[in-house]
Image (tube, helix red, strand yellow):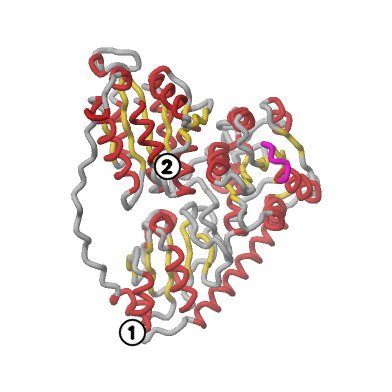
Amino acid sequence: MEWFVEDLQRRGVEWVSTLCGHGLDPFFHAARQAGLTLVDLRNEQSAAYVADAWGRLRRTPGVCAVSSGVAVANAMAGVLNAHMDGSPMLLLSGSADITTLGRGAFQDLDQVDLVRPVTKHSRLIDHPSRILHLLDEAWTAATAGPPGPVHLMFPMDVQKAAVTRYELVHAHRTQGQPGPAPDVAPIARALAASKRPLLIAGSGVYYSGQGKALLGFAGEFQIPVQTPIWDRGIADRDHASFAGVVGAASGGPKLLAESDCVVLAGAISDYRLGYLEGIAGVHRQDSGWDKIASAYRLAGGAPHTEWMGQVRRQQGEFAAALESRAASQMRGDRLHSRQVVQVLEETLSEDAVLIIDGGSVGQWAHQLLSQRRYPGHWLTCGRSGVVGYGLAGAMAARLAYPDRPVVLLSGDGAFTFNVAELECAARQRLSFVAIVADDQSWGITQSGHIRQFGQPISTQLGPIRFDLLAESLGATGVKVESVDALRTELGSAIRSGAVTVLHVPIAGGNPS
């Protein structure tokens, strides 16, 4: 077991998120002896979310260790999120002795097959001499493009077995030959010939590190860039060509239908893009943006100044419509999501890490904060659309960025999924500020029901004093009922370095 932990540390792993369980006792002991930090959670779901969020923020595998049986099923939520977002992650699960598997051992379950459909690699560690070989296989699969989650099942007798360094089987890799460089001329010619081009930059561009090159090309030739909502962002600073997020409940200016040349870059054609049905001139290009720029010039391509101006006007009109909708929903006795987002816009520094969990307030944030900037160090639910990951995501952000402000924006429904993790965050000094926008409902679903049926169905929630709940779990809690108070308390909470929950009762309403 010591060799396994040592190899994790050699790969740069400094911590493992976990919920203690006897199925991994030898691993826990070896980790403690080696100084590998164990970040403990109260739910395997949260433990997996922490590892998934680390992979999405840092582009290196987060490691999650859970026991066996139902513990693995619980962790599947985070693994599925990593699978759908394409983020690197290693799930390590324990089990009974390999000699008793399939014979009714405690929590006997074929975890390898359970996890396989949503991982790139799922294996049983079947012999102690192979632990480093199998770890290397899994790690390579997790990080090779496109990245994704992997799983190793570690039986108890294999964990306990003594093996010398000389008995260890090490990885044997063959040097592959690089494939031919993609021909970028067709894409360059298509973009140069178009009048209204559009680049859709998805999570694949973020994970491949191609974001800077793509934005450089788009900026030079004034081609608008959009990112599918919940994909990873690439515009860490205001960028003249970035035109916001597209898709889901409120998709921004409808540029897709007006474009005559759409290039998918690290993005997939799914529901957020209307499956690109009826869209002409669709191409795919995931890399090579520096070369595309040269080929574009050779093809006689010029900056799309007029089209970019039209896009900016549409963005302005869309923003004005959002403001009008917010004004129509405001109530005198409660803040509105628009006001919460405005305070964030005024308060957050450029390096601040913003975690957006479920809730109507998140839709407002996507559309209002992401009109010219969508940083890679912001984190959303991902393509799965999961809610309730936010507290774990905020803990992962603190692990990833020890010196940056970390703010979680969440609705009241999503916040209560794993609210007990506040205790774990406070105890382990993984500080962040959580703004809980509380409309006492599953707001997005409730709005949809009212539109369809004229009344909500099972979408209303009872009152919770989130500030007092936070205090009971070892965090700081503050109830906020005005814009000025929110501005003051948010700034103070960021400076305090404590886990702080700002309970903000809001008026309901979506931007769509």
Quadrant of the frame with the C terminus:
bottom right
What segment is highlighted magenta in the picture? 495-499
Does residue 385 lie above or below 42 as drawn?
A: below
- Given residues 377 and 410, the one toward you in this image is 377
Q: Is residue 134 left or right of residue 199?
A: left
* Prevailing secondary structure class for the magenta stretch in the rendered image: loop
Q: Which mark is residue 299?
A: 1
- Given residues 231 and 334, the one toward you in this image is 231
Residue 150 in percent (x, y) is at 33, 38
Name the residue beneath numbered marker 2: 12
Q: Is residue 457 left or right of residue 500?
A: left
Residue 275 in percent (x, y) is at 37, 58
Q: Nearer the viewer, mark 1 or mark 2?
A: 2
Q: Quadrant of residue 444?
A: top right
Q: Are marks 1 and 2 in contact (CB under 8 Å)?
A: no
Residue 278 in percent (x, y) is at 36, 66
Q: Is residue 440 left or right of residue 27?
A: right
- Look at the image and say whether residue 330 sits in the magenta stretch: no
